[in-house]
Image (cartoon, helix red, strand yellow):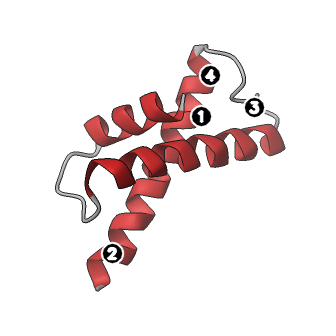
Amino acid sequence: MGLIAGGIAKFLMPGKDPGGCIVTIILGVVGASVGGWIGTQLGHGTVTDFDLRSIGLAVLGSAVCLLIYRVIAGRR
């Protein structure tokens, strides 16, 4: 799910990333985990099944991780 979420997040946030494809995949997996954890804590569901809510949470988490990575890596 993280790979798919990372791909969708990259599609929604086009541009040149400092880390390339591998870093984007890693950020997708991390973002899906973070999105699922935050969604669970807020009571919006989990990223355990393959449904729209899970994909939405995973993509949102991946997009946030990608944005944070761009801000941090862009300062260097």
CB of mark 4 within 8 Å of CB of mark 1?
A: yes
Task: Check disc 3 and give the amino acid type.
Answer: His
| Above or below for 45 versus 68 | above
In the rendering, at what x and y percent does residue 49 appear? 69, 17
Rendered position, 54 above or below 41: above
How far is mark 3 from mark 4, CA to CA? 8 Å
Q: Tell me the mark number nearer the camera, choosing from 1 and 2.
A: 2
Identify the disc placed on residue 3.
none
The mark nearer the N terminus, 2 or 4, is 4
Q: Which mark is residue 53?
A: 4
Q: How far is disc 1 from disc 3 in space, using C-alphas?
A: 9 Å
**Mark 1, secondary structure of its residue:** helix
Most distant residue in the front direction: 22
Q: In the image, what residue occupies the spot 37% across and 55% down?
A: 23
Q: Earlier in the sequence, mark 3 or mark 2?
A: 3
Residue 63 locus on image (x, y percent): 43, 47
Mark 2 or 4: the one toward you: 2
Q: Nearer the viewer, residue 2 or 35?
A: 2
Which element type, helix, strand or loop, lies under badge 3?
Answer: loop
Cβ atoms under marks 3 and 4 closer than 8 Å: yes
Q: Nearer the viewer, mark 1 or mark 3?
A: 1
Label 3 sits on residue = 44
The three-letter amino acid code for the residue at tag 4 is Arg
Q: Which residue was labeled with disc 1?
A: 57
Instruction: Name the amino acid, label 1.
Output: Leu
Query: Is the residue under label 3 in contact with that under label 1 (CB below 8 Å)?
Result: yes
Disc 3/disc 2 C-alpha distance (Å): 31 Å
Q: Closer to the observer: label 3 or label 2?
A: 2
Disc 4 is placed on an element classified as helix
N-terminal-most mark, 1 or 3? 3
Give the label on residue 73, or none.
2
